[in-house]
Each structure stands twice: as structure tokens, then as C-alpha cells.
Image (spheres, grey):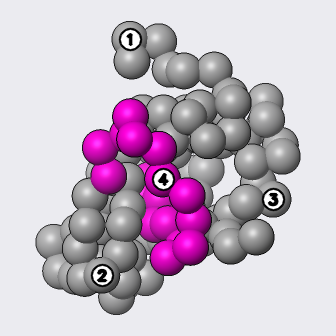
Amino acid sequence: MPRDTLFLLPPGFAANGRREFCPECAELWGLLSWYPALKETLDIVYVGIDHPRAPITALLSEGRHNAPTLVLHADSPRAESVPYTQSNGHTYLPSARLIAKHFSALHGTPVPRGH
């Protein structure tokens, strides 16, 4: 089975003179801890806080470097109910809620509240 690539910021990083974390990335780590089978479908790549985030922009082009971002493998299934984005020949989702909605549609996890 093809593996999609999930780009996340690390659980803690230095920014603004203090240690911080990304709430959206933490939201996905929570989902992955509740449903560990999802990890088997993913290659998880940590990116730094500084822009541009080269591993993401190398795939999607300049200006597209949000974390979290899920880049789908070319052969990965898509859900009709999810608004995917295309760039540089890749299909991707640039937010935790869209990624969770994708997991829900394709892997049967619960839908994020409000979606």
C-alpha cells in the first residue's frame, strides 16, 4: 500500500524566545495516538519552524509550507467529501482538520467536531 507523507513540526521548538508547540500538529499527534493504525499508512517527517520549510516546498513549490501538511502518494485513494489541493503535480491537505476529515472518510476514524 502506498504511504502518504505527513509533515509536522516537532513536539517542542524554540520560537519567540521561549519553547512552543504547534496546536494543529498536537491535534494530529493526538489522533495518531488514539488510532495508531493510521501511522502504518504514513511517513512522518518533522520540519523546522523557520520558513521556507524545504522538504514541503520541494514537493509543493514556494509559498506552500504549512505544517501540518499531508501529501498524498500518487496512488493513494481520495475521498469525494474532502477538498484536496493540488500543486506541482501533488495532491495535499494543508490543515489538521482537513487531514482528520480525510482519515475519517478513508480509515473510519471519527469526524472532527464541526465538520
Q: Earlier in the sequence, mark 2 or mark 4?
A: 4
Q: Are marks 3 and 2 in contact (CB under 8 Å)?
A: no
The residue at the far top in this view is 114
Between marks 3 and 2 in the image, the one whose residue lies nearer the viewer = 2
Q: Residue at x 50, y 76 (%)?
A: 74
For residue 80, say whether it is visible.
yes
Few, some or many C-alpha atoms within 10 Å of disc 4 (few <14, some 14-19, many ≥20)?
A: some
Magenta residues, dominant SS class: loop
Amino acid type, label 2: Gly
Q: Earlier in the sequence, mark 1 or mark 4?
A: 4
x then y, percent, for residue 93:
37, 53
The tag on residue 78 is 4
User: In the figure, residue 30 lies in which quadrant?
Assistant: top right
Q: Which residues are magenta?
A: 68-84
Q: Quadrant of the C terminus?
A: top left
Q: Earlier in the sequence, mark 3 or mark 4?
A: 3
Amino acid type, label 3: Glu
Amino acid type, label 1: Gly
Few, some or many C-alpha atoms within 10 Å of disc 1 (few <14, some 14-19, many ≥20)?
A: few
Q: Out of 36 and 29, give the one closest to the viewer.
A: 36
